Amino acid sequence: MSNGTRFAVFLGIVLGVWTGMHLFLLWRLWGLPVMAGAGFRRWALLLAAVGWLSYPLGRLLVHTRSFSWAPAVELAGAIWMGVLFFAVTALLAVDLPTGFGRLLPSWSIPLRLTAVALALLLSVVALVQGLRPPTVRELELQLPGLPRERDGLVLVQLSDLHLGSLLGRRWLSERRRQVEFLRPDLLGITGDVVDGDLTAVEPLVPLLSQFHAPLGVWAVTGNHEFYAGLEGSVALLKRAGFHVLRDQWEEAAPGLILAGVDDLTARRQFGLPDHPLESALGGRPPGATLFLCHSPLEVQRASELGVGIMLSGHTHAGQIWPFGYLVRLSYPYLAGSFRIGGMDLVVSRGTGTWGPRMRLFCRSEILRITLRAA
């Protein structure tokens, strides 16, 4: 299957789910008393059509730079995406146990009204949480092979910035100040710096180049770098002064090796059946190994290949509860720290957001990791 065909199938699935969610919401709202009049139903159909069109249209307008107000359309569509998710989830939560109203018909309308009210409340809470700055999470981890003179080295991890029309210059400036305050010796960026539109991120390159650390800024690609154009994304990161690790290792300092791979999730999506971990970790000299890998996959293999600490992101911890339960089906290591054999796996909840500027029960984060010699 060609890449174009794969993308068409993926796009068809996404649009199918998007359409299905709108139809389900209309169906469950149709029988409520407030919808009894023909006028209300016409407005509901119109609003559903506007909601369905909002996010895809906003993305298209931003990409083509057609209008100055295109980012506002995209933001409104993104927020609607979150509201729609909460509404569908809340309605399913009351419909499934009651057989869609058949088991408790007298309770059907009150339960659906309660579900809609709850969805609106959670949307407001999630929007407030999503607009808050990332919290700083502190960790202290032993890194086998770390030279004694490097004991106490501070590693700061950023992940999933998703820079573009929704997260731009002002947001990135605040993150730069936040990172500078943490005084990192080493800065690791585990993918998805670019959200999807390289032209929206190009003006941010001078600001990205202001991220500094004595032992360098190291980055790997995420799935969104693939979507935006892999080679163009890598070139952008290099212009910002980042050391981009593409299925390779480099020595950041004597006895400290940084290794990284192009994103494993995107490789699966684009049908690239190779063995990147062996390429990235093979033939390296003795010492401590930090492994940057956007998606928390092949963790057991990384441990077997002698990685000391593996840094990942991608999952956003689900970003909007309870979506994390679905994400965990594909990525069991959803967020946090895990011991895999002799390796520590650290999965970031993400520094930015994708789509809705919303988070619920999983605030965005920056990780500050103090490395200790074993």
Image: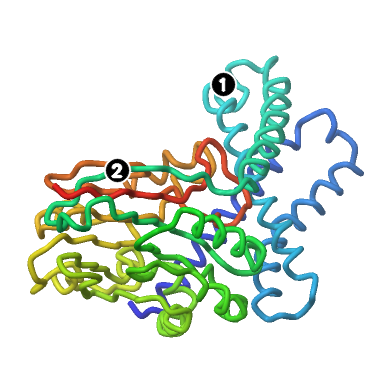
- Label 1 sits on a secondary structure element that is loop
* Picture residue at 26% right of the left edge, 48% below the top: 345
Give the total of numbered labels: 2
Disc 2 secondary structure class: strand
> In the rendered image of this protein, does residue 111 appear above or below residue 287?
above
Q: Amino acid at mark 1?
A: Thr
Image marks 1 and 2: residues in contact by CB distance under 8 Å:
no
Can you say which quadrant of the picture contains the N terminus? bottom left
Residue 45 is left or right of residue 220, and the answer is right
Determine whether, in the image, residue 18 is placed left or right of residue 155: right
| Inter-mark Cα distance, 1 to 2 | 48 Å
Which disc is residue 358 wearing? none
Res 98 label: 1
Question: Residue 140 has which mark?
Answer: 2
Q: In the rendered image, is residue 49 in sight?
A: yes
Q: Residues within 10 Å of mark 1 (few under 14, many from 20)?
A: some
Q: Nearer the viewer, mark 1 or mark 2?
A: 2
Residue at point 37% right, 44% down? 335
Residue in the foreground of this view, choosing between 281 and 19: 281
Residue at the extreme front: 149
Q: Is residue 220 visible?
A: no
Residue at 70%, 68% (x, y): give it. Answer: 57
Please tell me which residue lies in front, 331 or 291.
291
Which residue is rendered at x = 34% and y = 49% of the image? 369
Q: Position of residue 117 (x, y in %)?
A: 73, 29
Residue 19 vs 226, above or below: the answer is above
